[in-house]
Image (tube, rainbow, N blue to C red):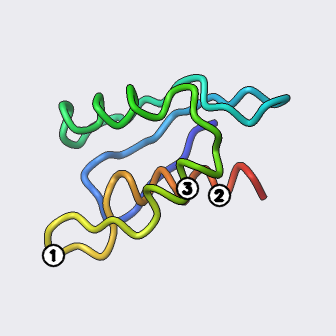
Amino acid sequence: MIFKPSGVCCTEIIFDIEEDTSLIKSVDFKGGCSGNASGISSLVIGMPVDDVIKKLEGIHCGYKSTSCPDQLAKALKKWRD
């Protein structure tokens, strides 16, 4: 799935979920802070969608009311619903 985030530096979040288990298979952030995005991607691979949403939802980036992790949580919620 491709998600267009808002309020952050990255322009796309591309992810793949294993349908049967709701485990995250891959996450790729386009743009933004490459080191942080790579770290987030590595950490969430193999995790259940609901666990990732709980951990990342509501994280802010500096003065912004959202962040790339928060936008990933929003993308996963959209996938889930």
- Disc marking residue 77: 2
- Residue 51 screen position, x and y as percent: 58, 49
Closest to the camera, between mark 3 and mark 1, is 3
Going by the image, does 23 lie left or right of 21?
left
Q: CA distance from mark 3 to mark 1?
A: 21 Å
From the image, tell me which residue sits under label 1.
63
Secondary structure beneath label 1:
loop
Closest to the camera, between mark 2 and mark 3, is 3
25 vs 15: above or below: above
Q: Which quarter of the image is occupied by the N terminus? A: top right
Residue for point 27% across, 68% down: 60
Secondary structure beneath label 2:
helix
Residue for point 78% across, 58% down: 81
- Disc marking residue 28: none
Going by the image, does 81 lie left or right of 40?
right
| Three-letter amino acid code of the residue under disc 3 | Ile
15 vs 79: above or below: above
